[in-house]
Image: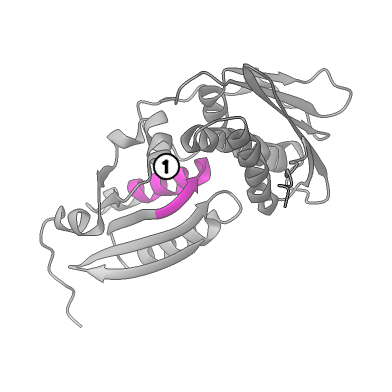
């Protein structure tokens, strides 16, 4: 009997609901594991994705649950690139306050996690509608923190 | 996410099973709110079976920590898997919460408390 290769689609369309985030994590974990990321590194990628999705759903889409979020992943020899495309309100990174790690806060860590866990992060608001978040993680980079 | 609570030596031991994210964190928050309303202020949160936690889960634990400290209580954590521990370390919450390997050590780290009279 010949083995059947399982194809994980490189793109995923999600409804703008928080309960869809678990499925997106499973999808990304499959790509990360195939690409050779260990479980901790894969978990870090999943955390960055979760924070990005949560921000899109709650802020760009203002918790409307009938919108769409498009994900894509691209793996090459050196990097894993993850994109999150939404069609909601624009997100301007510069408007966010920086996180004070000296005192515990009851929120505001989402963007901090994204930027701490990924090697390159770009919020492209030049797209005609919504936002395109591009996150790159080097395959050779070790765990963060 | 599944939650189970026990009371050991006057301390609430809350065991969480599953993933904690913004989709289900309200369940955890509601459970903690109920316990706080009942006057509980010393907690051990057992994260042994938590496979993933996002910033909403962390925020809930920070909020609990701040609330119980007002009443001279404390929150101690146990059983964190490495990938969950990494999240705490990233934002230096490992310096805020005392962490232990298991429930027994975490409960024993509290001073002896008198049980409330029935």
Residue extending farthest bottom? B118
Whether residue B70 sits left or right of residue B50 in the image: it is left
Number of labels in the image equals 1
Q: x, y (%) of residue A103?
A: 36, 30
Q: Residue furthest right?
A: A128
Q: Nearer the viewer, residue A68 or A79?
A: A79
Report the residue marked by disc 1.
Answer: B84
Residues shaded magenta: B49-66
Residue A52 appears in the rendering: yes
Residue drawn at point x = 52 percent, y = 42 percent: B54
Image quadrant holding the C terminus of chain B, namely bottom left
Q: Residues within 10 Å of mark 1 (few under 14, many from 20)?
A: many
Indicate whether residue A59 is drawn in magenta.
Answer: no
In the orientation shown, which residue stands out farthest toward the front?
A: A1
Residue A84, relative to residue B15: is it above or below? above
Q: Picture coordinates of residue A64 (x, y %)?
A: 78, 48
In the rendered structure, the answer to whether residue B48 lies left or right of residue A116 reads left
């Amino acid at each position: 009997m010949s083995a059947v290769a399982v194809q994980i689609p490189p793109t995923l369309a999600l409804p703008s609901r928080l309960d869809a985030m678990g499925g997106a994590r499973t999808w990304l974990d499959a790509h990360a594991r195939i690409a050779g990321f260990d479980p901790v590194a894969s978990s870090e990628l999943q955390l960055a994705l979760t924070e990005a999705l949560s921000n899109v759903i709650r802020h760009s889409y203002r918790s409307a649950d009938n919108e769409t979020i498009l994900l894509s992943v691209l793996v090459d020899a050196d990097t894993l690139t993850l994109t999150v495309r939404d069609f909601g309100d624009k997100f301007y990174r510069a408007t966010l306050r920086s996180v004070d790690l000296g005192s515990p806060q009851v929120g505001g860590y989402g963007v901090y996690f994204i930027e701490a866990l990924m090697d390159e992060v770009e919020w492209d608001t030049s797209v005609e509608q919504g936002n395109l978040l591009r996150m790159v993680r080097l395959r050779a980079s070790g765990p963060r923190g | 996410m599944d939650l189970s609570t026990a009371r050991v030596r006057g301390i609430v031991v809350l065991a969480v099973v599953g993933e904690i994210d913004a989709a289900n964190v309200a369940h955890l928050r509601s459970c903690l709110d109920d316990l706080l309303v009942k006057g509980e202020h010393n907690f051990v949160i057992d994260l042994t079976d938590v496979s993933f936690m996002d910033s909403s889960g962390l925020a809930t634990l920070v909020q609990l920590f701040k609330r119980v400290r007002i009443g001279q209580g404390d929150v101690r954590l146990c059983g964190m898997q490495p990938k969950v521990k990494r999240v705490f370390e990233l934002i230096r919450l490992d310096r805020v919460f005392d962490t232990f390997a298991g429930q027994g050590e975490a409960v024993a780290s509290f001073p002896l408390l008198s049980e409330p009279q029935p």
